[in-house]
Image: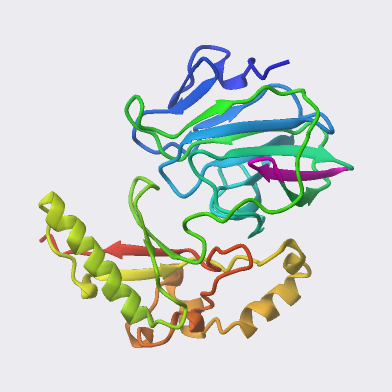
């Protein structure tokens, strides 16, 4: 039976999404954290829920399972940026997040299935292995779109039929174009403004700031914007991502491993993880930035362009 009955569509198209002929598209432009497509039936064991990604403008597009637990909706999903995540919906912090599988984007098929009490994901029919256990049996598939747009421009997926037995192959899917590249995201109302750079963790934070300023200046010249100076850029680091689920327990061991990777106190104590001026000549690896086994970086990096407009 196809997944043609969808919670969010019981009273017409939901805010921020439209559906037609099995294609679900995110719209309008402005980001909505609640732009979630929830299926109305649990995912049965040995069955596959799968979507084909038609457009993906941001670094993330979440595919997974959700269940109502202790008064809140709890999720288990892959996010497109090479992570498996367990969290409560609409909460900022993740309960669990670790490196898992490749980045994925437009043109790839992403699926979730249950087998032997475990929840696994697949990309292009390749089994990525078990990601979660003890997921409630009534958990239902969902897709979340972070970025919208005008017709034909927003994130979009095609829903595959559900109910068929899961057939996946062993072995990792081919690497993505961002594997081994440092990704820097910009603060702003959208999540699709980011840079992909060939920068090694041995480079200093000052070097990274200068490269980002050069790229932003080049962008500005093409669009008539102002040049970006390195001194106008603040670099921010988010918490470290575990390299595998096994690193998540116990908490004390995780903290010890993080410390051994050189997370310097100056960064750990700074508000929002911003890199202070006195530490700009330290290599990125001193802040715990490295490439994990699946090709993604160990800490998300954000940049904020600060200009005096007085």
Can residue 117 be seen by looking at this rendering? yes
The figure's colour scheme reads rainbow
- Decide if residue 39 is on the left or right side of residue 235: right
Q: Which corner quadrant holds the C terminus?
A: bottom left
Residue 192, compared with residue 33, is above or below; it is below
Q: Position of residue 238 (x, y in %)?
A: 49, 65
Determine which quarter of the picture holds residue 6: top right
- Decide if residue 104 is on the left or right side of residue 304: right
Is 123 magenta? The answer is: yes
Residue toward you, 191 or 212: 212
Q: How many marks?
A: 0
Q: Position of residue 43 (x, y in %)?
A: 76, 30
- Decide if residue 92 is on the left or right side of residue 301: right
> Residue at 14% across / 53% down in the picture?
222
Check the image and name the residue furthest to the top.
11
Residue segment shown in magenta: 117-126
Q: Which corner quadrant holds the N terminus?
A: top right
Q: Position of residue 285 (x, y in %)?
A: 50, 81
> Residue at 57% across / 47% down in the picture?
79
Residue 169, compared with residue 212, is above or below; it is above
Q: Position of residue 112 (x, y in %)?
A: 71, 38
Can residue 71 be seen by looking at this rendering? no
Provide the major secondary structure of the magenta segment.
Answer: strand
Determine which quarter of the picture holds residue 55: top left
Is 106 magenta? The answer is: no
Residue 120, compared with residue 295, is above or below; it is above
């Amino acid at each position: 039976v196809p997944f043609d009955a969808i919670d969010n569509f019981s009273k017409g198209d939901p805010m921020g999404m439209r559906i037609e002929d099995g294609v679900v598209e995110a719209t309008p432009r402005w980001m909505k954290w609640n732009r979630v497509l929830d299926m109305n039936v649990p995912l049965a064991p040995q069955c596959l829920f799968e979507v084909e990604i038609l457009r993906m403008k941001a670094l993330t597009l979440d595919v997974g399972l959700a269940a109502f637990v202790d008064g809140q909706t709890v999720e288990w999903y892959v996010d497109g940026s090479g992570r498996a995540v367990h969290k409560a919906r609409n909460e900022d912090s993740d309960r669990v997040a670790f490196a898992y599988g490749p980045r994925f984007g437009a043109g790839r098929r992403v699926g979730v299935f249950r087998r032997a009490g475990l929840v696994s994901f697949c990309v292009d029919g390749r089994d990525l292995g078990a990601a979660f256990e003890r997921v409630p049996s009534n958990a239902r598939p969902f897709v979340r779109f972070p970025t919208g747009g005008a017709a034909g421009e927003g994130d979009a997926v095609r829903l595959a039929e559900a109910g068929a037995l899961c057939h996946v192959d062993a072995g990792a899917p081919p690497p993505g174009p961002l594997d081994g590249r440092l990704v820097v995201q910009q603060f702003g109302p959208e999540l699709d403004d980011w840079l992909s750079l060939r920068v090694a963790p041995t480079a200093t934070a000052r070097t990274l700031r200068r490269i980002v300023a050069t790229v932003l200046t080049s962008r500005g010249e093409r669009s008539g914007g102002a040049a970006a100076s390195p001194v106008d850029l603040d670099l921010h680091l988010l918490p470290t991502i575990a390299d595998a689920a096994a690193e998540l327990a116990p908490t004390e061991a995780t903290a010890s491993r993080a410390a051994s990777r050189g997370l310097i106190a100056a960064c750990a104590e700074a508000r929002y993880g911003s890199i202070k001026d006195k530490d700009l000549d330290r290599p990125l690896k001193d802040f715990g930035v490295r490439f994990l086994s699946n090709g993604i970086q160990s800490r998300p990096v954000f940049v904020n362009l600060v200009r005096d407009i007085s």
